[in-house]
Amino acid sequence: MLVPIFTLKLNHKINTRMLTIGCYDGQHPCLTAATTAGKVFIHNAHNRGIASGRMSVSGENSDISLLNIQQAVSAVSAGKLDPTSNCDSLLVGTQTNLLAYDVINNSDLFYKDTPDGVNAVVVGSLGTVEMPLAVVGGNCAIQGFDLEGNDAFWTVTGDNVCSLALCDFTNDGKMELIVGSEDYDIRVFQDDEIIAEMTETEAITLLCPMMHSRFGYALANGTVGVYDRTARYWRIKSKNQAVAIHAFDLDSDGVPELITGWSNGKIDARSDRTGEVIFKDNFSVSLAGIVEGDYRMDGKTELICCAVDGEVRGYLPASREMKGNLMDTNTEQDAVRELSQRKQNLLLELKNYEENARLTKFFYKGRAAAQSNRPSGLGGLDTGQMGIIPANTQLQTSLTVDPGDEKHPPHVELFVATTNETILRTALIFAEGIFEGESHVVHPNVNNLSSELKVPISPPKDVPVDLHIKAFVGMKGSTQFHVFEITRQLPRFSMYIPCTKLPQEPQGTVTFTVQERVQRVVLWINQNFLLTDEWPAAAPLHFQVVSLRGTGALVIHMESNGQVTIKTDDMDLAGEVIQSLAVFLGIEDLQVTSDFPGYMEELKNILIKVDEFSSVRQKLTAEMADHSNLIRSMVVRAEDARILADWKNMRKYYMELFDLNRDLVNGYKIRCNNHTELLSCLKLVNQAIQRAGRLRVGRPKTVVVNACREAFKTHNIDALFKIMKVGAS
Amino acid sequence: MMGTMRQDFGAAAMALVPRGMDPLYTALSLFRRRKFEDCVTVCTMLLEKNPYDQAAWTLKMRALTEQLYVDEVDVDEEGIAEMLMDDNAIAEVARPGTSLKKPGTSSGGPSPGVRPTSQSGRPLSGFVRPGTQGGRPGTMEQAIRTPRTAHTARPVTSASGRFVRLGTASMLSTPDGPFINLARLNFHKYAARQSLAKPLFEYIFHHENDVRNALELAALATEEAQFKDWWWKVQLAKCYYRLGLFRDAERQLKSALVQQVMVDTYLYLCKVYVRMDQPLTAIEVFSQGLEHFPGEVSLLTGIARIYDGLNDSTNAVKFYKEVLHHDNTHVEAIACIATHHFYTDQPEIALRFFRRLLQMGVYNSELFCNIGLCCFYAQQYDMTLNCFERAIALASDENMADIWYNIGHVALGIGDIALAYQCFKLALASNNDHAESYNNLGVLEWKKGRVEQARAFFQTAQMLAPIMFEPHYNFAALSEKMGDLQSSYIAARKSVESFPEHMDSNSLLKQLKDHFAML
């Protein structure tokens, strides 16, 4: 049994996920967390007695110092930004800024505007960049700042970044950046190139590096799991949300466990291999964060868990004598319970067999009497009860595209059927990211049971999905059923149906050349699209499909000389096609020429809007500052009048103050709206850059993203469009 | 009626233009000679003739601006409102020696027992600048009361009060409406013409004191210049600074420094950091500035001032000496070094510095008072009273009390208790809030055995200057003698609070604690 070695009450609320620990003076670790009212507090347990003068007599809370950020804090992190010193720097992110702060000297290292917001911050060395970076994830953009505040790293990602982690994904000794975003994707960046993408089922709220290429993750729907590179080791799902995950070797076996803090106040430690719980504890309220550090300054690293009410518990790793047995339970009792459970199961099984044997005996007696000629040799009365079905029963599945009609929207249809007269009682389909809650149960009414089932599926994204189907097969009226398990893969582009005549010729085009035969591309088409017949491999290839999602047509045309033209109005789709094709054909670098007139027009409008919002914002800011100056002086005057007992004037001032205040609040609302609009526009711009990047592969992709950024920064809109079209300015 | 007035006006202007001289040339010459009023008159005449004369218009603007120009870098004081209501500083309780907010926390600073403190607990500086007098009051009431009682006028806010007073344009009466109607100006048009935009900006900023419009013009102009003109960036920063948007100001100044290194920009940037209570960052910025401008006096002074503010007098004096090395007529440096020497018990050296000040033409009562004190402590008694006589002769109402108080000290030093008593009374006559005099009077009364009187004096002093430790300690000692142990304990605690290392207070406190423990 593992018990906390220390507990503390900090008496400050801690915002969830905004907890870190840093040695700001190079020696003493300090818990640092964001608290209410735009403040960050630093708890320094070892400060007492060091400070002389007035510091030490400032009450019982003298070990907590507060930092004013003056804005709602959105991320807090600490780490070594300066490779030459051993002191940590504190990084505080808000929706508009990032502050790097030297706590011990009370001075800024840098203060940067981050118009894309700061949703997550990590500090560390990244890839081939020499200096340690503070990597900031915002709305669709990722930025890395070095010690001087230069942005040494910049890239875009598909959606708002929720979580970041640095992990040696490729086992090459250099850190890769793992990014979890709101579009359910985990992306791995090696420098500024994506080397892996994993699709999850919800927004990825937390990521933490574990050992080597292993990392833990948590989703917004309460899932927690561990990946090793792109392969998922395990995952578990809870109805509570994970608010903190951390890798820590709690049982001293040399391998870190995944420590999870839940929103209901539970913490548990799970083995990284199996997900088996090896330790758990309870807080009274939700966890806020988990960190590790030598908080008692005795040379041992503790696991430190903090709850939102400011309760802190520290755990030392268990000694070797405990042999990983950290739970508060008796092993013998456990064993007895487990054995009795098994006994129960075996008894049940035995009963089933006995029943079977009895019936068979009964049947042989019956056959002797009635010479019945039932095919599988079973009595009609008994088959129902027993659930015996023909031995050659098979489950067949097929996937077809249904263009839909007035009643049904277009969808992919999964058809499940048995090969004989047996019926399907229930079908359980498990697939990630298609159904809400990941699984779907079809349970037809008793009266219209049949041997086939149709399940409409509409995958929201173009990703290949494994459908795990479990079907209950039996006879009509049986109470016991056989379970058939089958796995079927849904191809990536399943929501597209071939057509000969296009409703409307797509405007957008992407052109590029590949050194491949047409047959290979046809092979890719056959694998990735849901086609009733295989597409003929003839040059020139002309392949036309229409999206069932209503986003228009997609035309893939390939000449025998390897020139490929993709026509679609959906830039995302074009990107998906190119990425998938490049992976299939093993293309490392691909430069394309693209033209999306409609989209570009839209982007132009957005950019104009961004300019407008920025200028309005500046005006509003000045107005607000002016007003607040006025308010301040008014307050002083009013107070002055109060001290002088000049009630008439005091009343006058306070009346004016009230009016001004109302104006200010109104102004604030306008500013808020303006800011949200601006933010959404900036997000769209970032997404546009990302889309332009996804049309390319490898080196050209990185080049295009960086060039776009440069063009956007210098307000060179024409250059931006040109880069998006041809890949360079 | 109006017509004749105007004619008269024109005639007055014509009188300024010599025969055969081009009026615009005359106006320019008047401007050069800093005869701004006359320049404005001539320009007005020119504009009367041709309202679209851009040269005359610009010149008039500049002349009007020059009349009211104040150096933004030097003149700055935090207003009461900012002090109390703003949290620009990041750390609320910073490590000692890293914040200007709590100057008393620095270790290694001069002890208040040796170097007296100002009303707010900051050690007396050798040179009075905005911000050296006041500290940070704890409450609004204290903040409002202090400027009324003490002789420090702190503006209500830095954005309103002072600039109405200094930038007097808003007070000046303009005979026929304002020169430029800002509401009707099309800023876009002017922003495009750099030669017009710059004087116009200065006019709006200094003369009209309309920061919001100035900011708008600057923002447009910097955009027009494709964000490549450092001057506009500095002006933007000025506006932001006035509006209290320090982070924006910081960004603009840093960006301006990238394009063009200027002493002024460095000074501004440091001002911003001081406002954000990051003295160490400010010192670093000053040092960066010194790399580009080695030996630049204003930068060195800036560093010295910050060290002074941090109570790190050793470093402050080091930098003041450096200043003197480059500019041997720097009054502030000389005064600060002199004060430092005086309070480190070297009155002879201090005297030499003060004499240097006198040679340089500084001729005021404070200086004579200081010289008098130095003479006294250097045992040149013949000069002492002469100096004080001069000081009194030159004194204004504001510093009369201090001079009488110092004479009282001298009297105490020579053992003339009666004279001392009279001096302190005189000090109180000229300023009845002089806490130090109350305290000393209390001591004298106690010596005479008039205990109740003494108590009353100490209590007054305590109330007037809660930061001073002496009245607290004296009161504690007196109460202890009288047997009022409770009051004694409370006062001793306060004394230790404002001067933790004070031996007598500590021993008194310990004695009281032992006593209480025995009970």
Image: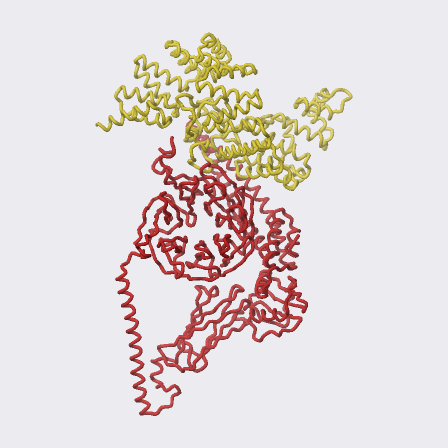
In the rendered image, the vertical position of residue B214 relative to residue A344, given as above or below:
above
User: In the image shown, does B433 or A163 lie closer to the viewer?
Assistant: A163
Q: Position of residue A673 (x, y in %)?
A: 53, 48
Q: Position of residue B314 (x, y in %)?
A: 47, 25
The quadrant holding residue B63 is top right
Q: Position of residue A68 (x, y in %)?
A: 45, 40
Which chain does yellow denote in the image? B
Furthest toward the top, the residue is: B382
User: In the image shown, does B78 or B27 lie closer to the viewer?
Assistant: B78
Quarter of the picture holding the N terminus of chain A:
bottom left
Furthest toward the right, the residue is: B20
Residue A180 seen from this side: no
The quadrant holding residue A449 is bottom left
Left or right: A528 in relation to B485: right
User: In the image shown, does B302 or A496 lie closer to the viewer?
Assistant: B302
Q: Position of residue B491 (x, y in %)?
A: 32, 25
Left or right: B444 in relation to A617: left
